[in-house]
Image (spheres, rainbow, N blue to C red):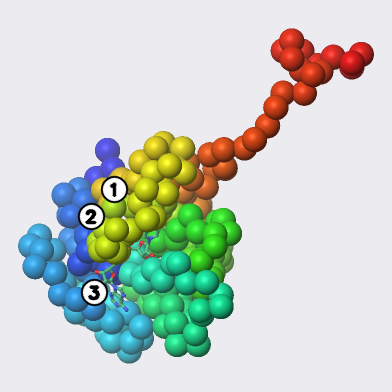
Amino acid sequence: MFSLHGKVALITGASSGIGLATARRFAAAGALVFGIDRSPSGEEGFRMLTVDVSDDTALGHAFDEVALEAGNLHIVVNNAGIQPLGVDFVNLTPQLVRKTLEINVSAVALGHAHAARHLVRGGRILNTGSFVGLLGVPGGSIYAASKAAVIHLTRSAAVEFAPRGITVNCVCPGTILTPAVLGIPDNPEIAFAERRTPLGRLGTAEEVASAFHFLASEEAAYITGAILPVDGGIAAGWERYDLVTPPNAVTGEWRDDL
Ligand code: NAD
């Protein structure tokens, strides 16, 4: 079940966090994995190409190199991203807007363009969104908007790639224990997310990778255009909602005579 034997996968942002966990998991499921990252990784078990995804010429060459070396390409995971959360609109700068959109949106859109040139029939495109692409959050500003764009790119690509049997899906992580979150000293987001997440804890990179694994498998062949939260329920609703039962319902029935 969920075997990736004989599949060739290319994963961006594979040196750390969610991308690294996904690369390890795909390799363990039998895939030949190529990772792309601007920082090299010391990881064995898959090949890394050092590329900044916002350099589209270099990204295109990396796709060409993988397809040439492996002879095929079955799975593309557009995962590399930066996370400038906690930046209010008053502090937003043109530089931050440009950089966030370049890495989180343009490189993902162009990742689809490169995937279109190389993916086999029945291939898979998987994108990393975020729960903040589904909800308004203070300090989300351009980061949250970039992830909303990834969600919509997923839907557009799903319909466009469908005639080739290529599925396109997006996983929206909640707050995940990766260097992006753990690397912030005394990060208050951790305590907040523990309190606010219905399941009461942060997620792990492996839990996000397992969703990617399922969506990459043959078993997920009929799923496309899906936006899958892997977030402990944080996008499902409020953790607290101050309600009182109206007198009409106190007995467990609805009484119209009150
Ligand atoms: P991470 O920082 O651990 O890993 C991100 C990787 O992407 C790093 O190895 C980094 O070098 C690489 N990268 C960044 N910019 C790049 C570029 N321009 N070119 C090539 N590589 C680049 O972070 P993570 O938490 O694993 O994040 C992975 C994805 O998950 C991102 O898209 C992020 O927005 C998304 N995400 C993370 C969380 C979370 O709580 N950690 C939540 C929702 C979504």
Q: Which of 161 and 35 is in front in this view?
A: 35
Above or below, comparing residue 214 to residue 64 in the picture: above
Q: How crowded is mark 2: few (under 14 residues within 10 Å), some or many (20 or more)?
A: many
State how far apart marks 3 and 2 are (Cα): 14 Å
**Tag of residue 129:** none
Contact flag, marks 1 and 2 (Cβ < 8 Å): yes
Residue at horizontal 57 percent and vertical 42 percent from the top:
238
Location of the N terminus (image quadrant): top left
Q: Where is residue 36 in the image (x, y as percent from the top left)?
A: 24, 73
Element assignment for label 2: helix
Residue at horizontal 45 percent and vertical 87 percent from the top:
95
Residue hosting label 3: 37
**Tag of residue 204:** 1
Location of the C terminus (image quadrant): top right
Residue 113 in view in this figure: no
Counting residues from the N terminus, which is met first, the one under dot 1 or under dot 3? 3
Element assignment for label 1: loop
State how far apart marks 1 and 2 are (Cα): 9 Å
Q: Position of residue 63 (x, y in %)?
A: 28, 77
**Mark 2 sits near ligand 1, with its Cβ under 8 Å away:** yes
Counting residues from the N terminus, which is met first, the one under dot 3 or under dot 2? 2
Counting residues from the N terminus, which is met first, the one under dot 1 or under dot 2? 2
Above or below, comparing residue 52 to residue 15 in the picture: below
Q: Which of 13 and 199 is in front in this view?
A: 199
Ligand 1 image position (quadrant): bottom left
Residue at horizontal 29 percent and vertical 58 percent from the top:
186
Residue hosting label 2: 21
Task: Please name the amino acid that badge 1 sits on.
Answer: Thr
Q: How crowded is mark 3: few (under 14 residues within 10 Å), some or many (20 or more)?
A: many
